[in-house]
């Protein structure tokens, strides 16, 4: 006999009281915009910073500003220690070893780092160890139709430089990946499979394990764009078994100018550098240079020290709050958004419908009203949303729109803010004289 | 009137629907062997994907050369589409010199951040876009068809 008693435990989440407390840590939220309390629903583009993050950056500049990994004076040692401690913090946050985490300016640079390293390997740089990263005519790079331009154009360019072919896995009408097509497209010629963990447009969360399995079957390398997952969900890159993962600091309560590349240690060890110069070398003559081991091999020039330290403070904040509970809260907000949007005449949500898993965001179109005009009307009510193609033109084309409006939440978003957004959105079509 | 109502004046929303001068069908290729001075320009707002193609036909070269015909096709927000419709009503039939002068007046007003009062006697319906100047992010929307017109005229003038 199997028990039919439903589980009594509910998914861990934040409470309204906790969210109010969290909001006190984000000074930017406590302001009025156009005469209304700021209703910030654009965290998918960039998140806000808690006081602790800003203090970490300020403390660094006030007390230990120095160049890292060079110089023997006290401040230089302290700065290096803080910089490397930040690496430990961020690496462990995603389940990685510190030596597997490379600082970059942002996720875009991290993807370009991988693509250019492969490109250099294709030119014969890096010797025998780099051969497995070399691409040539006949090889295939596979992406998906839902990629942010950051995870599309570097691969288009790599294909152009190496003669490899770029292919893509199509998406269904509901924004989910066509996994049947994926199984056919990822084949013996596939060398790289690059895809997003979660869509910044539809909020779809991709089945990483299944895609990794397809790649492993043919020995392809897996690159995961984790920009929308690492800030919002518990992510462990070892459990996911991806070869590379990228994310951006400013989308996870951190500052701009810092991002990271995770790469499996044995892979990074064989890759030729992308940017070259100071801080990434061992012995240099006038004609050649030996390079440091990863991660320093990929960190040429003076690093983003204060940003790395501030990002570690952001990670501390997220960890103390709890990623599982943050993910649970945002899943609730995402459902509240999509359910509310579904009830507004003339509004079409892009991606999964009510009750289907999605991130705490929703993109939509309002029949007869351009996204730019929707955004303008909302802004007048103090509501900040993203309008346009959200750096995903192919996906918008696939879903039959040129532009959409996106509301995206974070751990500091209240249910009241979501409701206020929905109520204001109802006024949009009538204002523009559109009858649904 | 609130800033938002000032931005979306009835004139603008009416033009957004009416689309004066818009072609319902894709524009056929320009007949390069034609003796007419006809040319077009396609402009894209990269931040939102709005686009407009403006085609102009000028009368024979000379000081009194006029904007004999214009037709446009585009996709975009109410501001950019209404602006194309207003452009059609405002610049059609003017001499090229007059059209350029009016275009500059329009541009100056839009870039003034609300400081330049729109002169309805000069700008006609285009004066309704004065509210846009308070929204710097939207100036590009309003200018899109006018920039296309400007480029198309230069191209048409290069024809004998």
Image (cartoon, coloured by chain):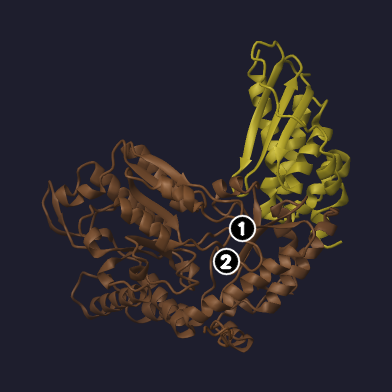
Chain colours: A brown, B yellow
Q: Nearer the viewer, residue A409 or A143?
A: A143
Q: Secondary structure at mark 1?
A: loop
Residue position for label 2: A358
Q: Quadrant of residue B7?
A: bottom right
Q: Nearer the viewer, residue A185 or A30?
A: A185
Image point 44% across, 52% down: which residue?
A151
Q: State the image coordinates of residue B128 (x, y, percent, origin top left).
A: 83, 48
Q: Earlier in the sequence, mark 1 or mark 2?
A: 1
Residue A37 visible in rendering: no
Q: Is residue A352 left or right of residue B16?
A: left
Residue position for label 1: A351
Q: Is residue A91 left or right of residue B138?
A: left
Residue A253 versus residue B140 in the image, above or below: below
Chain assignment, label 2 = A
Q: Are marks 1 and 2 in contact (CB under 8 Å)?
A: yes
Q: Quadrant of the C terminus of chain A?
A: bottom right
Q: Nearer the viewer, residue B136 or A223?
A: A223
Residue B39 versus residue B116 in the image, above or below: above
Q: State the image coordinates of residue A345 (x, y, percent, origin top left).
A: 80, 59
Q: Is residue B142 left or right of residue A224?
A: right
Image point 66% across, 77% down: which residue?
A31
Chain assignment, label 1 = A
Q: Are marks 1 and 2 on the same chain?
A: yes
Q: State the image coordinates of residue B153 (x, y, percent, origin top left).
A: 69, 26
Q: Is residue A254 left or right of residue A421?
A: left
Image point 69% across, 22% down: which residue?
B28
Residue A269 visible in rendering: yes
Q: Nearer the viewer, residue A159 or B29?
A: A159
Q: Residues within 10 Å of mark 1 (few under 14, many from 20)?
A: many
Q: State the image coordinates of residue A354 (x, y, percent, origin top left).
A: 66, 66
């Amino acid at each position: 006999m199997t028990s039919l008693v439903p589980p009594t435990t509910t998914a861990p989440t934040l409470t309204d009281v906790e969210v109010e407390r969290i909001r006190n840590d984000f000074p930017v939220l406590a302001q009025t915009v156009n005469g209304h309390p700021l209703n910030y629903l654009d965290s998918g583009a960039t998140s806000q910073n808690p006081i602790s993050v800003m203090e970490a950056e300020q403390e660094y500049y006030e007390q230990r500003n120095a160049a890292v990994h060079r110089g023997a004076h006290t401040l230089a040692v302290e700065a290096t220690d803080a910089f490397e401690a930040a690496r430990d913090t961020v690496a462990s946050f995603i389940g990685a070893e510190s030596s597997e985490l490379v600082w970059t300016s942002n996720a875009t640079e991290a993807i370009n780092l991988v693509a250019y390293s492969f490109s250099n390997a294709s030119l014969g740089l890096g010797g025998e160890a780099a051969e497995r990263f070399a691409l040539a005519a006949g090889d295939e790079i596979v992406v998906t139709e839902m990629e942010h331009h950051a995870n599309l154009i570097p691969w288009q360019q790599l294909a152009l430089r190496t003669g490899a072919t770029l292919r893509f896995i199509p998406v269904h009408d509901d924004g989910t990946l066509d996994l049947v097509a994926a199984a056919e497209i990822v084949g013996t010629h596939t060398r790289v499979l690059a895809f997003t963990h979660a869509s910044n447009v539809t909020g779809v969360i991709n089945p990483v394990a299944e895609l990794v399995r397809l790649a492993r079957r043919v020995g392809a390398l897996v690159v995961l764009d984790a920009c929308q997952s690492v800030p919002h969900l518990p992510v462990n890159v070892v459990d996911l078994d991806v070869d590379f993962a990228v994310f951006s600091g400013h989308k996870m309560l951190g500052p701009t100018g810092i991002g990271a590349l995770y790469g499996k240690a044995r892979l990074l060890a064989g890759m030729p550098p992308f940017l070259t110069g100071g801080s990434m070398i061992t012995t240099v003559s006038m004609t050649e240079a030996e390079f440091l081991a990863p991660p320093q091999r990929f960190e040429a020039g003076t690093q983003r020290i204060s940003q790395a330290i501030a990002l570690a403070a952001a990670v501390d904040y997220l960890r103390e709050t709890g990623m599982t509970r943050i993910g649970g809260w945002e899943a609730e907000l995402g459902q509240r958004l999509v359910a509310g949007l579904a009830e507004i005449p003339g509004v079409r949500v892009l991606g999964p419908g009510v009750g289907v898993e999605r991130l705490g965001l929703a993109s939509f179109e309002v029949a007869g009203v351009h996204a730019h005009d929707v955004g303008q009307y909302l802004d007048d009510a103090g509501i900040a949303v993203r309008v346009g193609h959200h750096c995903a033109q192919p996906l918008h084309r696939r879903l039959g729109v040129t532009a959409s409006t996106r509301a995206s939440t974070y751990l500091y978003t209240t249910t009241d803010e979501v409701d206020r957004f929905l109520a204001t959105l109802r006024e949009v079509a009538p204002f523009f004289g559109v009858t649904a | 009137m609130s800033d938002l109502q000032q931005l979306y004046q009835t004139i603008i929303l009416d033009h957004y629907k009416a689309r004066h001068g818009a072609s319902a069908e894709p524009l056929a290729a320009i007949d390069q062997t034609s003796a007419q001075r006809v040319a077009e320009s396609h402009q894209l707002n990269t931040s939102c994907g709005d686009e407009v193609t403006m085609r102009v036909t000028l009368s024979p070269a000379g000081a009194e050369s006029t904007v004999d015909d214009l037709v446009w096709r585009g996709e975009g927000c109410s501001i950019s589409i209404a602006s194309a419709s207003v452009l059609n009503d405002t610049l059609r039939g003017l001499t090229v010199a007059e059209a350029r002068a009016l275009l500059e007046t329009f541009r100056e007003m839009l870039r003034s951040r609300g400081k330049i009062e729109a002169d309805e006697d000069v700008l006609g319906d285009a004066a309704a876009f004065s509210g846009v100047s308070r929204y710097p992010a939207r100036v590009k929307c309003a200018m899109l068809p006018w920039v296309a017109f400007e480029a198309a005229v230069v191209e048409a003038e290069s024809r004998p």
